[in-house]
Amino acid sequence: MSISVGEILDKKGSEVIAISSESTIPEAARLMSHRKIGLLIVLNDKNKFVGVLSERDIVRAVAIDPDSVGEMHVGRLITRNVIACDPQAVAKDIIDVMNEKGFRHMPVVKDGNVKGVVSRTDLMMHS
């Protein structure tokens, strides 16, 4: 039997680490470093999910515009058209999508609300 993404969240925890789109990139980098995570959920001023910010996004910003990245807002760098999965999705299927699309984390969304985030490592450890 295949394990669902929701079952993995139950095992690993479903805490959602989020940041405002108005926060600065250094604030986001500090939060990621402190929490030892590679992806932040980004919320607008109404606490609605608007996208994600990854470590790779920050590295790219530093490489492209090192002089202004310190004042840059998270909203400028986020991925808005996020591929997400439902808690009922099968872990193996989600690993395949992540490998095909080339990303390491995926938000788990139900009824428009982010329920957690799974990484490729989470999925491989539990499936």
Image (spheres, helix red, strand yellow):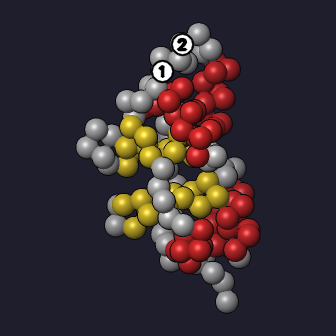
The dot on residue 95 is: none
Q: Is residue 50 visible?
A: yes
Tell how many labels: 2
Could you say where residue 6 lies in the image, as x and y percent from the top left? 52, 74
Which quarter of the picture shows residue 22?
Answer: top left
Q: Secondary structure at mark 2?
A: loop
Residue at the far left in the pictured view: 46
- Count residues near mark 2 (Cα–Cα under 10 Å), then give few for <14, some for 14-19, many for 20+: few
Indicate whether 115 appears above or below 48: below
Q: Quadrant of the N terminus?
A: bottom right
Can you identify the residue that label 1 sits on?
A: 72
Q: Is residue 95 above or below residue 18?
A: below
Label 1: how many residues lie within 10 Å, few (<14), some (14-19) or many (20+)? some
Query: In this figure, which residue is indicated by the disc labeled 2?
Result: 68
Indicate left or right for 21 with 122 as reference.
Answer: left
Q: Are marks 1 and 2 in contact (CB under 8 Å)?
A: yes
Image quadrant containing the C terminus: bottom right
Q: CA distance from mark 1 to mark 2?
A: 6 Å
50 left or right, relative to 64: left
